[in-house]
Amino acid sequence: MSNESYPASASADGIGRLQHAVSERYGRLKDLLVYSSLYLVVVAVAEVLTAMVALSLPLSLAPVVVGLVTFAVYVGDRVADADTDELSNPDQSAFVRRHGRTLSTLSAAAYGLALALSLTAGPLALAITLLPGAFWVLYASDWLPSVGARLTRLKDVLLVNSGVVAGAWAVALLGLPLAFAGAAPTATAAVVFTYFFVDTFVNTEIPNVGDRHADAAIGVSTLPVVFGVARTRRILYAVEASLGVFVAWAFFEGLLSAALAGGVLAGLAYTLAVTAFVGRTEAYSRLAIAGELKALVVLAVVLAFGV
Amino acid sequence: MNLLVPLLFVSVAVGAAAAVLAWRERPEPGATPLAGLLLGQCVWSVSIVFQLQATGVASKLFWLRFSWVGVVIIPVAWLLFALEYTGRDQFARPRYVVLLSLVPAVTVLLAATGGFHDLLYARVYTTASGAVEIREGGLWYWFIAGYTYLLGLSGVILLVDLLASEAVTFRSQGIALVVGLLAPWVTNALFIVGVLPVGAVDPTPVAFSLSGVIYLGALTRFRLLGTSPAPKKRARQFLFDRMQEGAVVVDINDHIVDINDSGIDILGVTASEVLGSPAGTVIPEYERFPEEGALSGHLTVGDASGGHPYDVTVTGITNVRGVPIGRVVTFHDISKHLRQQQRLEVLNRILRHNIRTETNVIHGYVDRFADDEDARVVKRRALRIEEIGRKGREAIELFDEGREDGEPKPLARLLERCVDGVRESHPEAVVDCDLPEEDVAVAGLLTPVFSNVLANAVEHNPCDRPRVRVTTRIEGDRVLVSVADDGPGIDDYELQVLEEGTESALVHGSGLGLWIVKWGAEIAGGDVRFAENDPTGSVVTVEVPLLDRSADDRSVANGRPSDGDRLR
């Protein structure tokens, strides 16, 4: 009897060990994707592909360059802010500290590679590739205050902080595929730019709700710090609603295809649902990731109905 | 030429990555200039790529002229890096940066206005194959080339010290930095003399990709910027400036070349008025100073209202070949020490003369009044007071001898004398002594230490025939003298007070004997340990270093047949 039950027990142990191993590996993969900002690379590449589809641009190295720059800037930011993030995001801070030197070297190498690749598309592509890095220096690093006592990090200034991030990414997401294709900006490109700008602005303010106490402690002014959580939610509703009206107008003006307008509006509905959780959850890290993943929803709709 | 383009891409990728890493290391010394250097390299490489990509002559000329921005950043950034990295950041202040950037700024201006003059010309040629080729030259071209090499060489000279550093990390950093610079410099030199088969395109930025790889390696592997020698130079200057002793550095002709803050205070001068002056006109009695060593007696410096006495020491400075190049004169303020010595002399006189006189008087008067038990108690107490006075004198003499560094004495003779002393004062005691087999010497000031240990062992022993055993053991360059008795042992309270090192009105020992033992052992460079003896009593072990014997003591010791002749 015991002989018969032994293999069953061993099998159960084996499954348990396997489950543990899978769970451990999944945990590590999740840490790698989330804490190293790799998921943001996927999101950024999806947005560039959306822009390329919307503007009917040929396939180029633009998504690769945007992905590399996204990785470089966000990882660089997390390495630089590992100390201040300890309060608001201790797990991420611990991960970044543990792999600090590797992440720092990888992000620097990613930026160097992105710049080299952008050279193939000419000076404009190089300038646009430089833009997020230059904005990061102005936005997040302590260089600006170090050159003059009256200057402050743009990250500390209300609306300017999210505006700079949104502007830099909107230019990069739209400008790079245009530069790589050698195409001129069009009215449709302007609409896509506005969409990227507003979308990135909202996605920047959602995680700020979770960071409000830490931000207030280090003097960073964000919407939740200045207006509180409930009013921030209402402001974000208003911004998203305005974007919806703008997209509908652009569609009726013939500036956007039905597939793109549908994709953006589907994405907006998704974002409104995410925004509804602002002030009603404490899992802001997950909420921020959910907000960012909207780009995949938009790309899926655009590809499903546009191609 | 085909190979050059991908290499330029690599140069940009590696240079930009290294620049980002260097930028992140701010505010480490040298981080910002290094990022600037790598940025200059990237600008240069990018300009060449776009120059090659450009189809029209005008845009080729634009990128050629734009490349000068990167070209001229590099030497300035390199020199600033070397200055900051080697701790000479006082020369990397904005005014010097502006000064160093004047020639580069003029160069960029001349490049931008190249169409109007020939100082930095760029002439367009069409080759036999129809390709457009641009060549540069002009008077300013050679001037900026010379300027670039001058700054490059200056930076290398500053970093040469690192190559000879004792620390492997700094040596590796130095090699990485110098090789990283030499690669593009050599490439550029070969290009200028026309040896490289690259046509009119300067391949120097490609060589900078090698520099980028080396700097990346140095940043990550050798902790370039993470472990920086910059504080070393400043720390030495800081110590010199802030040391408590006054210090004046004179050259071989006795002119003052440096003086620290304390030196300025002591001499009552300002640095600007004494630097370069003959030392004799600034330092009193300078002619009395020895070439090297301590000045005999002390030097009083100060005005009529009251000067301060100083011990003066002169130390020679030599160059790497051992040739004298100057001297450092140090002034050690001994006014506190002299005041203390004065107080001890007065105290010594009171303990030696006054107390003894007063106790003698008490003794004499008591004899005249009565001869009963009360009178005997008063006489015993008077003797006790005299004993305390004697111990006090011993302590003072101990400190005096301590200042005179304790003349070496043969241990055997010193112990014999102490043992004879206790046998004489306590004939009932049985004292065994194992003298050291080797002829070794210890500080002469240990006499009261051993006397007190022996006296304690006998005096506090209530037995009719107290037994004491003295043993010695040599361990390396130290000797352990143990005194074991069969008395009641030393009270824990006494030992606790001794261990804490301080006494108060409420917490104190019963006398001075144990303090003399502890102080004496410590002044002689050793210590004292207490343990319980088996079955009863205590073992006091004094551990002190062995000293070199003086010639006189050796001759005395050699007269003893039992002594060896070993010199330590």
Image (tube, rainbow, N blue to C red):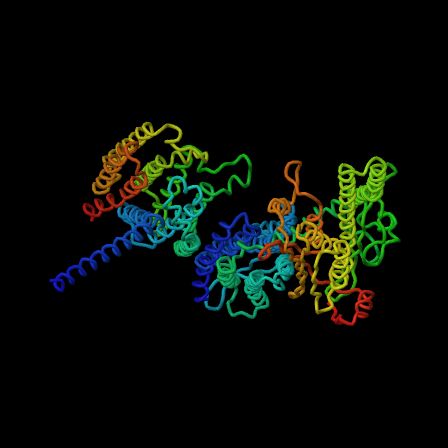
- Residue reaching furthest to the left: A1
Q: Residue at x 61, y 55 (%)?
A: B82
From the image, which quarter does the N terminus of chain A lie in?
Answer: bottom left
Q: Position of residue B520 (x, y in %)?
A: 72, 52
Residue B350 vs A226, above or below: the answer is below
Q: Quadrant of residue B157?
A: bottom right
Q: Residue at x 24, y 44 (%)?
A: A297
Q: Along the horizontal axis of the image, is B370 left or right of A144? A: right
Q: Along the horizontal axis of the image, is A180 left or right of B29? A: left
Q: Give B456 or A32, whichever is nearer the viewer.
A: B456
- Residue reaching furthest to the front: B372
Q: Position of residue A292 (x, y in %)?
A: 30, 42
Q: Give B143 or A65, whichever is nearer the viewer.
A: A65
Residue B262 vs B46, above or below: the answer is above
Q: Give B116 or A155, whichever is nearer the viewer.
A: A155
Q: Give B430 or B328, whichever is nearer the viewer.
A: B430
Q: Position of residue B452 (x, y in %)?
A: 72, 52
Q: Along the horizontal axis of the image, is B445 left or right of B201? A: right
Q: Position of residue B17 (x, y in %)?
A: 46, 55
Q: Along the horizontal axis of the image, is A67 left or right of B96? A: left
Do we see residue B271 in this rendering? no
Residue A172 vs B469, above or below: the answer is above
Do we see residue A149 in this rendering? yes
* Image mark count: 0
